[in-house]
Image (tube, rainbow, N blue to C red):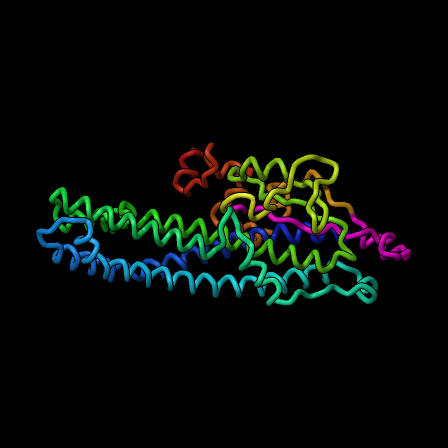
Amino acid sequence: MGANERLRDAMLGHAIDLTHYSNAQVRAIIAVLNGHDANLKVRLVEAMENVGTTLTAAAIDRVLSSVLQVNTAAFLDVSNALNNNIDDLLAYELSFQQATMQAALPAVVQAQLPVIAVEFSAAQAIVQARPFQGRLLREWMQGIEAGRASRIRDAIRSGVVEGRTTSDIVKQIVGRKSENFEDGLLQRSRRDVETIVRSAIGHTAETASDAAYEANSDIISHVQWLSTLDNKTSSTCRIRDQLPYTLKTYKPIGHKIPWLAGPGRIHMCCRSTKFPVLKSAAALGFDDGATRASMDGQVPASTTYAEWLSKQSAGRKDQILGVTRAQMMREGGLKLDAFYNDKGKLLTLEQLRERLK
């Protein structure tokens, strides 16, 4: 297996690891947000009891100030936790990219052309200064905080004017325990935070690889787009899968499909990534036959995620699919698309068993 093929396989596997990491971070950040819900509910009840008979917007807003203070505190904690996690991820990604390229390159090449490490501070500045989907991370979080504050305020204003009970208004905002609180207005902000967490992770990971590959342009020819090919993959990413682009300028090579924001950033929650295609041994000035063989392996252009998955070990499949689904794939000969419905949503195990009857 040549260096380019090893790099491609490493990046495919890493994309799956990032998905698992993203899932874990979503749970952790939402837990931080939810940690303020009990206090928010208490302040909501207190505010409703202090509204009185003056039902002007200004009077209602005055008693709402303590509620909105809780909202501000919640998003301050969320932002701090997310920023810390982003910094940790960035440091890991820079280290991973360097180590992966070092593992793929023959020692004789590295002796003359060592892989260049990227300074964390330089990459961090890029992550913080570069917007994704039109906004910086802090601007996205500020927008979600303001939106939640507005929904809370509007629900209380309308509820008071309509003469609804405190209990009804609180349930409308917080949700009902019987519905796991997912029917309240606060659920919208949870979904928004999840979207931003996943998008920020993709943005950070791709910024790290941008910096790593551009710093090593003496050994890298170009980059190739890698889409996570399953039923959830967007049409935007499907059409770009396997397409090559120039390094640094990211211009199309041999096609006309534009790079736009690039993998991991082209749309919210993008799971696509890229991998570096190394220059040939001859282009680097090496004539040794063994070096050519290890450097110049071709990357199968037709390889899909499903095909890659089928070649992975049982342990890796268990990690990616879960033990039960991986067992179904092994014993029942199921293909990857069997685990999704026609809208690209992963079927629950109960739904999957029902389909297989």
| Nearer the observer, 351 or 43 | 43
**Quarter of the figure that contains the C terminus:** top left
Measuring 50% from the left and 57% from the top, which residue is drawn there? 21
Residue 123, magenta (yes or no): no
Q: Position of residue 140 (x, y in %)?
A: 44, 52
Specify the segment rendered in magenta. Answer: 270-297
Q: Position of residue 135 (x, y in %)?
A: 49, 50
Total numbered badges shown on the rendered structure: 0
Q: Is residue 59 above or below residue 39?
A: above
Residue 21 visible in the picture: yes
Asked which quadrant contains residue 109, the reply is: bottom right
Q: Is residue 247 above or below residue 352?
A: below
Residue 292, magenta (yes or no): yes
**In the figure, is residue 8 to the left or right of 178?**
right
**In the figure, is residue 178 to the left or right of 342?**
left
Residue 334 visible in the picture: no
Q: Is residue 113 above or below residue 298?
A: below
